[in-house]
Amino acid sequence: MCSGRVDLSFVLRAFSKGIDGVFIGGCHLNECNYVTHGNYHALNMVLLAKRIMEHMGLNPDRLRIEFMSGAEASLFVEAVNGFVNQVKKLGPLGVSEGINANEVKSKLAQTTNLVPYIKLVNRDKLASRLKTPEEYDGLFTHDEIEKLFREVVSYYIDPTKCQACSTCLKNCPADAIVGGKNQIHVIDQEKCIKCGTCLNVCPPRFGAVTKISGEPVPPPIPKEARTIARKSKT
Ligand code: SF4
Ligand code: SF4
C-alpha cells in the first residue's frame, strides 16, 4: 500500500487497538512512481499526528516514518529494529505518559471523531512538499494544534428556523441528522464529523444551520416539541 494511503484515522485506530508504536515505511521523497507523491502526504500526516499525540499527552516517538527503497533491506531492518527497541523502552501506551488505559481510549476516540474536521482545516498544509528536514518542525506548531482543539467548531440547527425540508439530512455524509416530515431536524453531535455540508446546503431563505466555535452547543430540542404546525390549506 502506498504510504500516502495511511490516513490519520489508521494511526489513531492502531493506538486505540492497543498498539504501542506505529512505523510507516515509504519510498524516498521525490522518488514516487506516481504523480501523486503520496509519500509527502504520509510525511505531513505523520508530522500532524505527532503534534496531536503531544496534545493528547502521548509520546510522539511512538510514531515514526522512514523513507527507503525496495533495494534497501538492511536499512529497513535497521530502522524497524531501532524503532522496536525505542517502543520497548517506552513501554505500553500511556504507561510512561502517566495516562490510564481508559483515558487513552477516550482521548483517541474523541480525536478520531474529529479526523475529517482536522484534515479539512489543515488541507493546505497536508498538501505541502517540504524541501528539508529542518522544515518539519514548523509545519504544524504546538500553538496552532492547541487552538485547533480549543476552537473546534460544531454545527447546530436553530429549531425556530428549521422548516424540515430535509436537504441537510439527505446530504449529511455521516447520517448525523435526525428528522422527518414536518419534524424540526436535529444534529446528533456524537455522529457529526463537522464537515459543514449542512451549513452549505440549508436553503438561505431558512438559514437554520449555525456554526459554533469554542462554545458549547445548545441542547437538542426535545422530541415531543419537534413537530412543526403547518397552516392548513383551505
Ligand atoms: S457538519 Fe452537518 S453535514 Fe457534516 S456531519 Fe455534521 S451534521 Fe452532517
Ligand atoms: S436544510 Fe435547513 S431547513 Fe432544511 S431541514 Fe435542514 S436545517 Fe431544516
Image: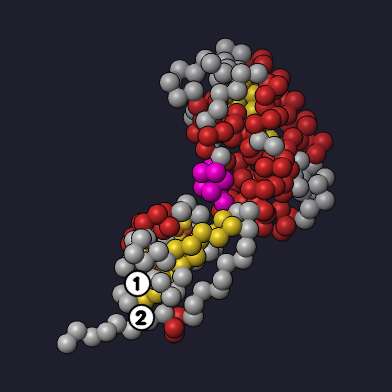
Identified by mark 1, the residue type is Gln
Quarter holding residue 102: bottom right
Q: In the displayed image of the protein, which residue is found farthest to the left?
A: 234
Indicate whether 214 appears above or below 90: below
**x and y, in percent, of residue 12 in the image:** 61, 45
- In the rendered structure, the answer to whether residue 85 lies left or right of residue 202 reads right
**x and y, in percent, of residue 65 in the image:** 64, 28
Say which mark, if any, is on residue 81: none
Residue in the picture at 52% in, 38% down: 123
Pointer 2 with pointer 1, Cβ within 8 A: yes
- In the rendered structure, the answer to whether residue 46 lies left or right of residue 197 reads right
Helix, strand or loop at label 2? It is loop
Please count the marks in the image.
2
Cβ(mark 1) to ligand 2 < 8 Å? yes
Task: Classify 10 Å Cα crowding around label 1: few (below 14), some (14-19), many (20 and above).
Answer: many
Sequence-first disc among 2 and 1: 1
The residue to which callout 1 is attached is 163
Give me the C-alpha separation between circle 2 and circle 1.
8 Å
Residue in the picture at 45% in, 17% down: 33
Q: In the displayed image of the protein, which residue is found farthest to the front?
A: 205
Residue in the picture at 59% in, 57% down: 213
Indicate whether 59 appears above or below 83: below
Tell me the magenta residue range.
114-121
Task: Classify 10 Å Cα crowding around label 2: few (below 14), some (14-19), many (20 and above).
Answer: some
Q: Is residue 118 magenta?
A: yes
Residue 158 in sight here: yes
Indicate whether 212 appears above or below 19: below
The residue to which callout 2 is attached is 228
Identified by mark 2, the residue type is Ile
**x and y, in percent, of residue 165 in the image:** 31, 68
